[in-house]
Amino acid sequence: MLLQDNRNRTMFTLNCKGRLLIINEPIIMGILNATPDSFYSNSRKTSIDEALRLVEQMLNEGATIIDIGGQSTRPGSQQINNTEELNRVLPIISSIKAHFPEAYISVDTYHSPIAREAVQAGADIINDISGGTLDAAMISTVASLQVPYVCMHLKGNIETMHAHFAYENVTREILDFFIQQTEQCRLAGIHDVIIDPGFGFSKSIADNYKLLKELSTFQLLEKPILLGISRKSMIWKALHITPHEALNGTTVLHTLGLLNGATILRAHDVKEAAECISLLQAY
């Protein structure tokens, strides 16, 4: 839901299984990868104890949402079956919910069975990299679960989603995609949709920077905008460095994203992302 606060600033509310998440300032989604092969090794936490330590740190540093993924989507990653994905994420979701009940948990999956099981285990939000295009049952499943839905843009399939596709106008085409998919969500009964332009997925580096520059265009949709650029190749390839050296570049692009309308920063480095938000609020 979109509202206006008394300073004429956009405010969103997300109904997370009966808990109302009010977003009247940008917030942070901290990344926790329950995988052995995600591109940034410091985010990989496959044991419950490791995961809980990282979650505690991220919450203390200012994260509002913890995003848990059991299937790596980096280029060249191996796909796993649903059973393995569930075995990776469900124990961590349950443990986080038990130890940090105040945290909002999203599950990063494009499989509807994983989404259903994850919500039953305690997840509050579904984060789907395909925006409902890789699993025809995803949108109806999320509607039945009555949780917020992160609808991300990509083109192609699992094998081709990191290829560079040709766009006549990348921003306009992705805006059209979101108009179509958010209408499908509305018709299915999903009340709270977050949009994610899908930086790094089926786009060239030039496409990514054009999208970042024109991010405010997506405010036309009147939905929260998730910015997922943390340590991605659009940074480290442009600077000829590695993902482990890309924190400074991430901070720069987070700042630009916030200035252009980002609502949620999906970040590996929560402390630094929170500092971006605080400084821009003071500016």
Image: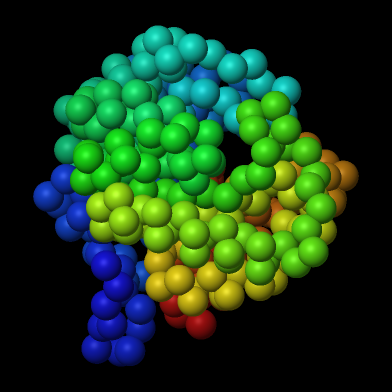
Q: Position of residue 86 (x, y in %)?
A: 37, 16
Q: Residue furthest bottom?
A: 7
Tell me if I can see residue 68 in this picture: no
Q: Position of residue 268 (x, y in %)?
A: 53, 42
Q: Residue 141 is drawn in which quadrant? A: top left
Q: Position of residue 231 (x, y in %)?
A: 66, 44
The correct choice, above or below, for 154 with respect to 209 in the image is above
The quarter of the image holding the N terminus is: bottom left
The correct choice, above or below, for 241 with respect to 167 in the image is above
Q: How is the image coloured?
A: rainbow
The correct choice, above or below, for 281 with respect to 197 in the image is below
Identified at 38% across, 34% down, the residue is 137
The correct choice, above or below, for 24 with respect to 133 in the image is below
Identified at 69% across, 71% down, the residue is 213
Identified at 80% across, 44% down, the residue is 164
Q: Residue furthest right?
A: 240
> Looking at the image, which is closer to me, 133 or 99?
133
Does residue 83 appear to the left or right of 163 in the view shown? left
> Looking at the image, which is closer to me, 272 or 136?
136
Tell me if I can see residue 205 in this picture: yes
Q: Tell me how many marks there are.
A: 0
Q: Position of residue 170 (x, y in %)?
A: 72, 62
Identified at 27% across, 24% down, the residue is 117
Q: Residue 20 is drawn in which quadrant? A: bottom left
